[in-house]
């Protein structure tokens, strides 16, 4: 699967196709990827084009070429099949697409020979309800975000967790994130970095109108309910993983909980979450710039 319309994506897809053909394996490309400009399908031998919704059903491994956003799109189609997903980074940060394009041939061969690490990431499900009727439903690998859309007014909402009242808050919104999403939008909002092996959900207020409001980390078994207060003056919106937003009205409720399916990420050998944080978030920049001459790098 390839999503971003960049020349580098096309180059990497061709390289992957060549390696797959060399190993005598069957190669499938989804119909959306097949329409990418400059993708010369005749260069990919033994190629079959299928609907994206069928990839998880017929494939043993799905390779996603692009950025982390491409993995978010892949999760929608693949999570229910539990097919492993390998990400090749042609984006910016690459927390989820951790294979360097320059090493894709070597890393892919290692993976196909059985040398890899599996990583289960849980998802969130969100429902907007009017009484008992579900008017909108979606899923998210990173986060579900309540926000004020184009308005400059704060949202007035009530938060409940496991049927217990938490707070009424005036803020620009609320980010409800998985551990995977803790290094995405929630990180920009001042939330904690949560190791992806933990089963937890993080709630990060967006510019709250109080100095005491802080991120909250709760169990993955928690049910989160948000309702808009009657005094609210703007139209709140809800988005899952940055997809088009939908309105949340005062007579509706937003329910967020753990999704029954998981996304299975596949990493080449040597994957290290902390190394990813060091390189993607530049944790070592200060140490490298200000190290004293002769200082022991091991300390």
Image (tube, grey):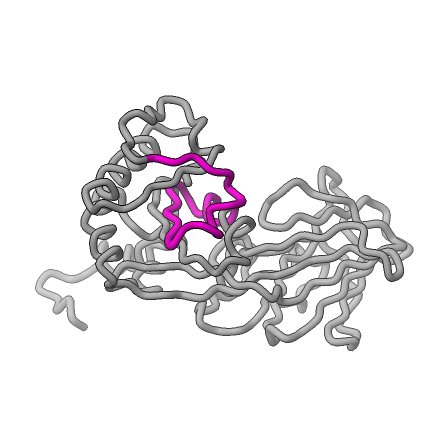
Q: Is residue 76 magenta?
A: no
**Which residue is painted at 25% across and 50% down in the image?**
108
Count of picture labels: 0
Q: Position of residue 199 (x, y in %)?
A: 53, 73
> Does 279 sit left or right of 71 as displayed?
left
Farthest residue, direction left:
294
> Does 7 sit left or right of 192 as displayed?
left
**Which residue is painted at 61% across and 61% down in the image?**
124
Extent of the magenta region: 47-73
> Does 103 sit left or right of 173 as displayed?
left
- Tell me the quarter of the picture where residue 196 sits: bottom left
Quarter containing the C terminus = bottom left
Q: Position of residue 99 (x, y in %)?
A: 29, 50
> Which of the two residues, 293 or 275, is positioned nearer the viewer here?
275
Q: Is residue 38 above or below residue 77?
A: above
Q: Is residue 56 magenta?
A: yes
Q: Position of residue 8 (x, y in %)?
A: 31, 32
Quarter containing the N terminus = top left
Q: Position of residue 131 (x, y in %)?
A: 89, 60
> Does 168 sit left or right of 196 as displayed?
right
> Which of the two residues, 111 or 277, is positioned nearer the viewer here?
111
**Which residue is painted at 47% across and 58% down in the image?**
183
């Amino acid at each position: 699967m390839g999503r971003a319309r960049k020349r580098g994506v096309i180059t990497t897809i061709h390289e992957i196709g060549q390696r797959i053909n060399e190993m005598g394996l069957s190669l499938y490309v989804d119909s959306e990827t097949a329409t990418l400009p400059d993708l010369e399908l005749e260069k990919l031998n033994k190629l079959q084009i299928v609907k994206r919704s069928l990839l998880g059903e017929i494939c043993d491994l799905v390779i996603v070429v692009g950025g982390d956003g491409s993995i978010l799109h892949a999760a929608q189609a693949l999570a229910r099949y539990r097919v492993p997903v390998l990400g090749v980074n042609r984006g910016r940060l690459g927390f989820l697409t951790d294979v360097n394009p320059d090493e894709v041939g070597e890393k892919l061969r290692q993976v196909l020979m059985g040398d890899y690490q599996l990583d289960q990431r849980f998802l969130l499900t969100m429902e907007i309800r009017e009484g008992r009727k579900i008017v909108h439903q979606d899923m998210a690998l990173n986060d579900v975000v309540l926000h004020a859309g184009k308005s400059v007014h704060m949202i007035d909402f009530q938060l409940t967790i496991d049927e217990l009242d938490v707070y009424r808050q005036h803020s620009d919104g609320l980010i409800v994130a998985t551990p995977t999403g803790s290094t995405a939008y929630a990180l920009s909002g001042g939330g904690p970095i949560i190791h992806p092996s933990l089963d937890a959900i993080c709630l990060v207020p967006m510019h709250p109108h109080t100095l005491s409001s802080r991120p909250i980390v709760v169990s993955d078994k928690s049910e989160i309910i948000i309702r808009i207060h009657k005094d609210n003056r703007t139209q709140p919106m809800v988005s899952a993983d940055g997809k088009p937003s939908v309105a949340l009205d005062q007579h509706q409720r937003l329910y967020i909980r753990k999704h029954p399916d998981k996304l299975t990420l596949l990493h080449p050998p040597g994957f290290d979450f902390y190394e990813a944080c060091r390189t993607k978030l530049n944790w070592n920049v200060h140490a490298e710039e200000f190290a004293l001459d002769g200082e022991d790098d091991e300390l």
